[in-house]
Amino acid sequence: MKSLKLDRRDSVALYRFKKLIKELESKEGRGTELISLYIPPNKPVSDVISYLRQEYSTAANIKSKSTRKNVQDAIESAIQRLKLFDRAGPTGLVIFSGAIPQNGGAGSEKIEVYHVIPPEPINLLLYRCDSRFYLEPLKELLKERDVYGVLVIDNEEAAVAVIRGRKVVELKTFTSGVPGKHHAGGQSARRFERLREMNLNEYYKRVAAHANEIFLKYPEMKGIIIAGPGPTKEQFAEKDYLHYTFKDKIHVVDTSYSGEEGVREAIRRAEPFLKELRMVEEQRLVRRLMSEITKENPRAVYGEREVLRALRSGLLSLLLLSEDLERYRIRVKCASCGAESEYTMDEKERVSRLPEILAKPCEKCGQRALQVAEEKLLVDFFIEEAEKLGVKVELISSEHEEGAMLRSAFGGVAGFLKGYGG
């Protein structure tokens, strides 16, 4: 029995929502025995139960005895889950129920039931029987809603980027090919400057054409940052180079760089404008960490052992975790004396090192009775430890530069100690 309600602002809830969808996606029934039920907001559950009772009666006509039993059991399980509710909530309700084979053999099926409270309204009434759960409406909700454009420009080069949620999803760079200013005087210099201005105008138009082509692919775009190291950005922003629909979405910032490096700097300098963007919040947290650990008496720790020690000692106030840590926390227990040990391993070590550990005699009683008592992703292990102690957790994507640094330089596990005021 599993349920989940998602708060899009909560990185742990979002992580669990993605994980549940991935788990549901892996389920496969025999024939069309898995039920997906989408209920729109505020619909009385009694109406849906009445409908399911009719489907239960219809399923009695299924010729295959095992399929008939599995479908009817799935419907009955869905009904029992629905009885926990009077009506669907303001965002609706989704039920998944079905007979899932447990070890590949016929007759091994077990009814599994899940319910999901969508983070946003799903105005859909749907009942579907298939060999897999129907997940497309929920997957649609996972798409990042916060999208911003970045255009960094000077007279020599430009870069156009799109930020969606936690990563830069598009990045193009351009060079102007326009020569620098003519320093000699006279008529030739004036002619040179006129030609240069014409070339610059063509360059601006070319950059704008590429930017419009990219930005218009994202109708949900909330804003556009125009940045650069000199007056070019203001000149570009003031004229109607970009599509008219972007006119009221432009925010201008100064940067020391242009090109790709300018994009990263523009994102940092436009933090107040990008406050709804999850990537900006994650970058800010990692930069705070890097700043703190360089101090003489840092109020931050990093590395699995140090963070776990601080966490279990009640010293931690905020835990930072790389979302995509591909490591496992494994608890090994002796079936003879009950002695336990814990290990952290990556996937390769699970295959090679873990069997060697299990083959050894127990260090306490000497019996060869070691077995895996528990195994979970390191991210899940730390989240659960933190929740026991009421410590806030922020999951950080490795899709951006700061997130990649948290994973590579700090082992993907870090935290701020209590009393840190940053």
Image: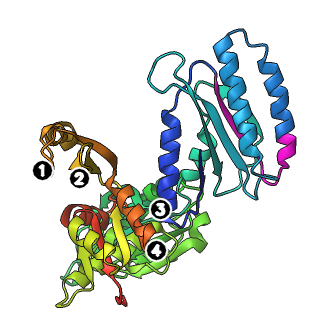
What amino acid type is highlighted by mark number 4? Gly
The disc, 1 or 3, on the residue closer to the chain's N-terminal end is 3
* Cα gap from disc 3 to disc 4, whole angstroms: 13 Å
The disc, 4 or 1, on the residue closer to the chain's N-terminal end is 1
* Cα gap from disc 2 to disc 4, whole angstroms: 28 Å
The quarter of the image holding the N terminus is: top right
Q: Which residues are magenta?
A: 33-48
* Cα gap from disc 1 to disc 3, whole angstroms: 37 Å
Q: Is residue 356 left or right of residue 343?
A: left
- Label 2 sits on residue: 339
Q: Position of residue 309 (x, y in %)?
A: 26, 72
- Tell me the crowding category of disc 3: few under 14, some 14 to 19, or many 20 or more residues within 10 angstroms, Cα based: many
The disc, 2 or 3, on the residue closer to the chain's N-terminal end is 3
User: Is 407 or 352 nearer to us in this picture?
Assistant: 352
Circle number at residue 363:
1
The disc, 1 or 2, on the residue closer to the chain's N-terminal end is 2
> Looking at the picture, does residue 113 appear above or below residue 60?
below
Asked if labels 3 and 1 touch by Cβ distance under 8 angstroms, the answer is no
Can the viewer see residue 114 in this picture?
A: yes
The quarter of the image holding the C terminus is: bottom left
Asked if labels 2 and 1 touch by Cβ distance under 8 angstroms, the answer is yes
User: Is 81 or 124 nearer to us in this picture?
Assistant: 81
Can the viewer see residue 202 in this picture?
A: no
User: Is 279 or 205 nearer to us in this picture?
Assistant: 279
Magenta segment includes 106:
no
- Tell me the crowding category of disc 1: few under 14, some 14 to 19, or many 20 or more residues within 10 angstroms, Cα based: few
